[in-house]
Amino acid sequence: MLESVDLQLQPSEIVTLIGPNGAGKTTLVRVILGLLKPDAGRVRRKSGVIIGYMPQRLQLPENLPLTVARFLRLAHPSGSGGIDAVAVELGILHLLDNPMQLLSGGEQQRVLLARALLRVPDLLVLDEPVQGVDVTGQVELYRLIGEIRDRYRCGVLMVSHDLHLVMATTDRVLCLNRHVCCIGHPESVSKHPAYLELFGTRVSDGLALYQHHHDHAHDIHGDVVERGEVDADG
């Protein structure tokens, strides 16, 4: 159960949702996607907003004959032009004829990301986008997500358990434990007492944070000052 969650998702901003197991991350994502109706509060979406969703994992029957191209066409049935363009963008053009079941963890995550991008979304919701990917692949995927944000000027909401890499590749972090423990820039969140209580000082001291560059402004509190796409207030 979630209590008193107030979250605004802005255009051209990457927000990362972190928290322990059972903190309500999945519930909040379902509410944002419209799959779950909150018992109290409300969700306000910008008129016409398009959401692209990348699930944490995909489990397919071993005997299901499904190539990457066919899988993507299920999300984009109007033609292959858009699929080819996104496949080039994500470096998976050579995989289009491969069975989905034979992809590596990193390849499958790129295909799932491509499927979400075919909607040309205003908001990308990524549930554990580096699940099953080695460290090198994680760095590359986070870099790619940043490039996608810049190119599409879309908001990005990521759910992650990986504190080290994801905290260095996000604009804002929301720490959730059935309620919002703290929210703000990664550096300030990593030193917040509520964060330290959940994850400990060793994790905080080991985080590699860097100053990122983007084309939107922050106010004196570190918040992005642009009109929001989605507000979740409950």
Image: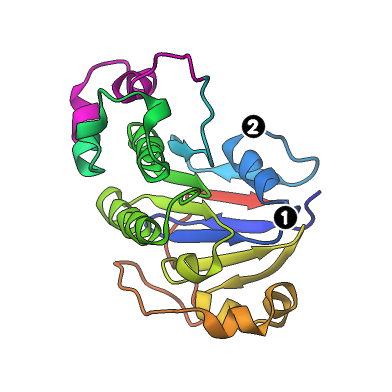
- Res 154 visible: yes
Left or right side of 144 for 175: right
Work out whether 173 lies above or below 233: below
Work out whether 74 lies above or below 206: above
- In this view of the protein, which residue sits in the foreground, 68 or 73? 68
Q: Is residue 67 on the magenta stretch?
A: yes
Work out whether 18 lies above or below 186: above
Q: Earlier in the sequence, mark 1 or mark 2?
A: 1
Q: Amino acid at mark 1?
A: Asn
Q: Amino acid at mark 2?
A: Leu
* Residue named by callout 1: 21
Residue 9, position as x, y percentages in the image: 51, 55
Q: Which residues are magenta?
A: 62-85
Q: Is residue 110 on the magenta stretch?
A: no
- In this view of the protein, which residue sits in the foreground, 104 or 114? 104
- Crowding at label 1, few (<14), some or many (≥20) Cα neighbours within 10 Å? few
Q: Which mark, residue 35? A: 2
Residue 111, position as x, y percentages in the image: 36, 36
